[in-house]
Image: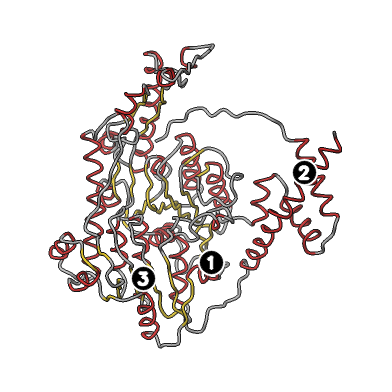
Amino acid sequence: MKQFLLTMAGVFAGLFLFFVLIPFLLIGSLIGMASNPKDTTPAQAVLELDLRDGLTDQDPRNPFAAFGGPGMSVVSVIEAMRHAEKDDKVKAIFVRLPEGGMAPAAADELRLAFLHFRKAGKPIWAHSQGLYPSGAVISTYMLGAATDALWMQPDSSFQAVGMANEDIFFKRFFDKYGVRADYEQRREYKNAVNPYLYSDYTPAHKESETAWMSSIYRTGVLTAAIDRKKEPVAFVRAIEAGPYSAEQAAARGLVDKVGQVREATDALIARVGGKAKLVDFADYMGQAAHADRGRGKPTIAVIGAEGPIMTGRGGGGNPFSGDDTVWSDDVSDAFYEAIEDKDVKAIVFRVSSPGGSDTASEQILAAVKAARKAGKPVVVSMGTYAASGGYWISSQANEIVAQPTTLTGSIGVYGGKFALGEALARFGIDMRSTAVGGEYANTFGASGSFTPTQRVAFAAWMDHIYDGFIARVSEGRKLPADRVREIAKGRVWTGVQARQLHLVDQLGGYYDAIDRAKALGGIRGEARIKHMDAAGSPFEAFEKMFGVSAASLRTLAAAGWVMGDPRASAILDEMAAARLRATPSGASVMAPTPIH
């Protein structure tokens, strides 16, 4: 039996080597070459920036994530554009716009980069194959309006006439099938679970949603009017009187030219001299990312936080996943690393998170406070959203910079469970529970609703978290607690609204936050930008996935792949067998955590 297991382990190890390890090593070799890229940009280049596949806010920590999701991030794009401004080889940028909406704050951030690029004396053109009413399409149009020339494909449709959203309510469905949603909210604007509790909008839900949507729409259309040098009232009327064909939109001054994408690129190349070559922006971005950022100069540390906030440390799972999570241990470690780095004079904390665990958020906030105590100012740069837990971790920074359409605030908390016992009983499935200790021990059991005692205790827990959130915001923003309670209640605000309420300090983007960090850190002139949470190597990704050391993998790669040493197979066989012997069986239990 032992020999059989060893043989099977060898078979699996061989399959692993052939189907997994060798492709990863090939990819790793390419990534290794990219770590010291040669400048392959032609003498005259027009960069083609394709936004149709979407963008993350920040580069993922996973080095293989580009294979499972968008390959570019907002931050990496705008950093590469700053590099391109000073690169004599880059003559212009050509942008392919998505047909639907894009994240409003991402459009705001890119717009600032477009305007900065134009200010450097280089043209940037955009082309659209149609604008359709999907999401915040007005933000897509606003971005195109910020370029030197906006083209549309002939006979395509211009439908950027407003902004709409639909919510699905499950209350009547739950009532029909016996599902009970037992949730506590703090307070009435914390509407994330309203679809489970009601069959229609509550007044607070409708008010909040209408307010932030109106703010985003108004920002987008008025900004487009300013960038196109149009009288705002007439421009808004023209927008809302649509939809139009591309030709009709051009006749009304909403776009500049009608033509196929090839016609637009040819015209731009002719504009810059006729000898330029189209270069994929993603390829150029890889070279720009490794350019000298000012070694030996005072340093600004950049720490990223994108996605839901959870306790623990990242690693494992699908190596190709582009999904990101804010792991409290990882983000905290990045702060303490920046604290210990003597060259770091200030920190920019880039936050794009809808919220998450209050426990994880508090751990990260403690690291922010530790940085400030160590004399290293922290400036938050808000991305698409920094709401709920995203605002919790931002609240005590020295300063907060947000885009006009960043969704922020949502100072509140909710938590609870679904009681499924009655629903399952209708299908002949009976749930029973056994508990020992106090009555609260079975609070989160799915068989039934909260008992009165359990609800009182759970509500007190929600109140405690909410009161703590209020206190942290009050301290960090230097606002009276009563004032924070007035503007909290779980309500979502846009950056424009949050600035008026003093929840953020300044409207602007990533580089505005960099400038504020330099000023607070006493840095004059150029500063080195150091990303404290950059992606690891592909070998390190393997280490997290399989528990095999990166050094061992490199050694094995050299012996087994480069030299063809047959002993590599035996090593893999033994490694697999050892892991089979050492791997324990077990189960994990996840306790409910309030999400805010």
Q: Nearer the viewer, mark 3 or mark 2?
A: 2
- The residue that disc 1 covers is 289
The residue type indicated by label 1 comes to Ala
User: Residue 493 appears in which quarter of the rendering?
Assistant: top left
* Residue closest to the eye, 283 or 377: 283
Q: Is residue 118 above or below residue 365?
A: below
Which residue corresponds to the image point at 74% horizontal and 57% vertical from the top-left?
554
Name the side, left or right, on which 61 lies relative to 352.
right
Q: Is residue 62 above or below residue 169?
A: below
- The residue that disc 2 covers is 576
**What is the C-alpha distance between the residues marked 3 and 2?**
54 Å
Name the side, left or right, on which 20 lies relative to 129.
right
The residue type indicated by label 2 comes to Ala
Q: Are circles 3 and 2 on residues that touch, CB within 8 Å?
A: no
Tag 1 secondary structure: helix
Rendered-image quadrant of the N terminus: top right
Which residue corresponds to the image point at 78% horizontal and 57% vertical from the top-left?
555
Which residue corresponds to the image point at 28% horizontal and 67% vertical from the top-left?
156
Colour scheme? secondary structure
* Residue closest to the eye, 578 or 100: 100
For marks 3 and 1, the one nearer the N-term is 3
